[in-house]
Image: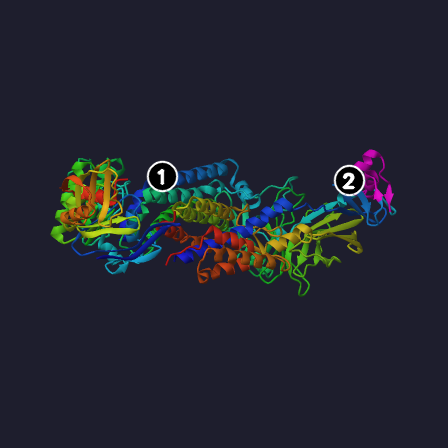
Amino acid sequence: MWKSVFYKEWLKIRWFIIGYTLLGILGIGYLFLALKHSFAFTGGKNVWNTVLFQGYQFYGLFKFVPLAGGLTIAVAQYLPETINKRLKLTFHLPLAGNRALLLMQAFGAGSLLVSFLIFFGLVAGFSLIYFPIQMVTDGVITILPWLLAGFAAYFMVALVVLEPNRIFRLCYSLVGGFFLTIYFTSAGTAAYAPANSGLFILTALLSIAFVFSAYRFRKGEM
Amino acid sequence: MEKISRYIMVFIAVITLTIFLPKLYWMAFEKPVRKPFIQYSCINNEFMIQRTSEKKWEDTKGKQYSREEYEQMLPMMFFKQLLASGTMPDSIKGTALEMRAISREKSFFRLKANEIDAPKPGLYPLFESRSGRAQLELPDDFFRITWRIEFIDAATNKIQEEKSQMFSAALFHKGFSFPTKTISGLPTPRKSCDEGYLILDSKDQLFHLKMIKDKPFVKKVDVPEGLKFRQISCVDFKNKDFYAYLFSDKNEIYILTQDDYQFIKWPIDEYDMSNCDLKIFGDLFNYMVIIEAEDHIKAIALTADYQLVEAFTEYWKTKEQLTEGKIFASLFPARLSMASENSKFIRFYFTPSKGFDWVFLNILLMAFHFIWLSRRKVRLKNHLADLGIVAVCGIYGLIAIHFFKNKFFD
Amino acid sequence: MIECNNLTHHYGEKLVFENLNFQVKEGSILGLLGKNGTGKTTTFNILNGFLQPTGGQCLVFGEDTQHLSPQTKSRIGFLIEGHIQYSFMNIHQIEKFYSGFYPRWKPAAYWELISKLNVPPGQKISNMSCGQRSQVALGLILAQNSDLLILDDFSMGLDPGYRHLFIDYLREYAKAENKTIFTTSHIIQDMERLIDDVLIIDFNKVLVQSTVGEFRSNFRRFDFELENDETDLKNERFIVNIEKVKNKVELYTYSSESEVKRYLDDKHILVSNFTQVKMELEDAFIGLTGKY
């Protein structure tokens, strides 16, 4: 049965996730072309110098890409469920309790994870060509909150979209919007190292947030 | 699961509010602190205080000066101005004033608390110390120290095996115990000359590493028994008296003299490096150490050979101690912030409010919520947790539990 | 199969119905009739588990509708008002989707209905006409092969051809496989062709709960003309409803012709042209609940 749930979710998001991933890959390709160009024209030692001592992040443009992905996939997945209250159909399915919802969420988050892993793999892989492991690790520490923000955005948008009451949707959006800024506090490379594990836990907690508004949707809270 | 989901969102909302409500509050009500600029006058042996925003120049006894009088008291600092206006004295304290000496002895050093608690790059350029060139050039490789020292060519990202082995052997033979605790130096070509790096190994032994004519120069520096350094800041001063300022884990300040590697402890005990900013002005006659804390500025004057002359402290009320701060402490139980002034790391910085005035508001809010609940004829048993949240989290809790309504059907 | 006890619901302060009691027996086809606003959709929402009634309880297969187990849900086919479906799918995708949930899925039942549509295989349901979409929704319900069908307004948006088609299918299917159906529709002639039993609700109460046959035979309409226009018959107990235009009267009652005539004689009310009018279900419904 989970296969069918995944099938429906795939039908909703497939073009979005494929398009987003392709765009992301192209974007990363561009970043590395630019990096290669820098290496050729300014010289490796100068690039390293700016990265190590002047806070240059060649992947900086990537900052809001995971966030955009999370927002897009959440809207693509959950907005169609709210039209004509179609989510009711899912609640009729012979699945225990919130299982259907959690499967939907798992698929969306899983798709995002695949995209992010592809991005991450490409960035880390290419970086290792040009930089030693310490610098790549620092870059990973820096990128990690942005990736987590992508998931957090996905979870929170699901929460907002499913909420039946307009005023509460606004409240949730406010909380969500301000909360997401925590992932983007202006900081230097690798500065997020101590906070990443806490952020990871918070993001993981958010994954079941939407069960609350789905429940309100189901109980006719209008 | 719905209830857990709701409590998670309440928790997230509380965290968000704990960050942003105080932020908004201080954005509205915080007043800037006008810190005075303090220097020691070698003319009248007084601390001269400049209050820029009030356009006041005075000394610690309250005597007021005009701007010109003030500058005359600090000839080392304003020698260009005094030369231009023709009021530069020929000698001070029997010492004839010679421009080159003044310029050579002038130094400025600054260390902020957030530079100490900050991510470290891990890779550094080791310059050729005796290149024979007027300008230093960035080397082609950078080094890191793990279980050995490795030089990696930046253009190819490959380890220079021969060089790495040569330098590793040199360190090893001097008793270096890998890996390293800190690597300190000036990793920029914009300095007058290169003095390499001061490196603490895993056993807190101090080594001086340089590259001279492509060969390793390693000197093990004898550190006095029991002295552990937390921060080493290398300097590039014209007088070349010392390599670096070193700060021990007991907040002591040392210098390491050039060439003979002697540690000289400065007579300063009031420096808390985790929470204060440090500025050290050096000139022909004195060293001026300025320690800026949250609620005071301490100025300590030393002679040119590091003896204590005098100290002066000025206190002010922090924002927490002013009326706005007291109101804050009665409204908000605590504050959460991702960034800190004293660190470059991002953490969940949690600061409880001083005192317990906020407890009154919490109880009031709890009562208010209780009345609100009884009007709605709900079963109180289901709302005990909410009341608890308001009791502990105060206004943050009250807002959070209303944003995420406690309405369940069983 | 379905049992609702003392069902009460309010929307805020407003009462929808109170102490509603009814049952749907296995193998029967029960139609729910009522004017707009009497709580038909509310009842369906409660049966779906989408609304928590302010009082009382509904049981389906012995389980509280607010907490149906997955096994029970697989035995119930729901049609949501408006034939709502995941219309971003096409006819193949949607069949593939639902078939994964129901072990007793009968694709033939779906495709038989769908083959009557002339749509290209890749066409999204959202791009179909209202009637075509309804056919898809109904085909899915039939393919699910559930024991109980709960259909909220199955005829909404359908034109007569589709409606007749569907009713025929449904009734044949239900009787052949001993399915139970609980349904409602605005088009009472459709209901008449489909249902065995009827449940008529009005604001706050159940008016009729019996077989269609019984209701039609017990509930009668008598037309006559009054000699005296001024005669007021409204408050008589045996009169369920009365429509009076000048001296022409339509009288709706459960009483027999003789009982009515005896009453009129007793009250010395002179009438002429007294006839019993045969009613279809729709007429009976309007007679029972009144024109607006």
Q: Are marks 2 and 1 in contact (CB under 8 Å)?
A: no
- Choose mark 2 or mark 1, whichever is in front: 2
User: Which SS class for mark 1?
Assistant: helix
Name the residue type under label 2. Lys
User: Which SS class for mark 2?
Assistant: loop
Is residue B324 at all visible to an observer of this figure? Answer: yes
Magenta span includes B80: yes
Q: Which stretch did the figure color magenta?
A: B64-92
Name the residue type under label 1. Gly
Q: Reply above or below: C3 against A40.
A: below
Q: Position of residue B150 (x, y in %)?
A: 52, 52
- Please name the residue that numbered disc 2 is placed on: B55
Q: Reply above or below: A63 against B150.
A: above
Compared across the picture, whether B402 is left or right of A222 comes to: right
**For this rendering, which residue is in front, C172 or C191?**
C191
Quote the CA–CA distance across marks 2 and 1. Answer: 61 Å
Magenta span includes C155: no
Q: Position of residue A115 (x, y in %)?
A: 38, 45
Q: Quadrant of the N terminus of chain B?
A: bottom left
- Please name the residue that numbered disc 1 is placed on: A19
Q: Which mark is residue B308?
A: none
Q: Quadrant of the C terminus of chain B?
A: bottom left
Compared across the picture, whether C76 is left or right of A105 comes to: left
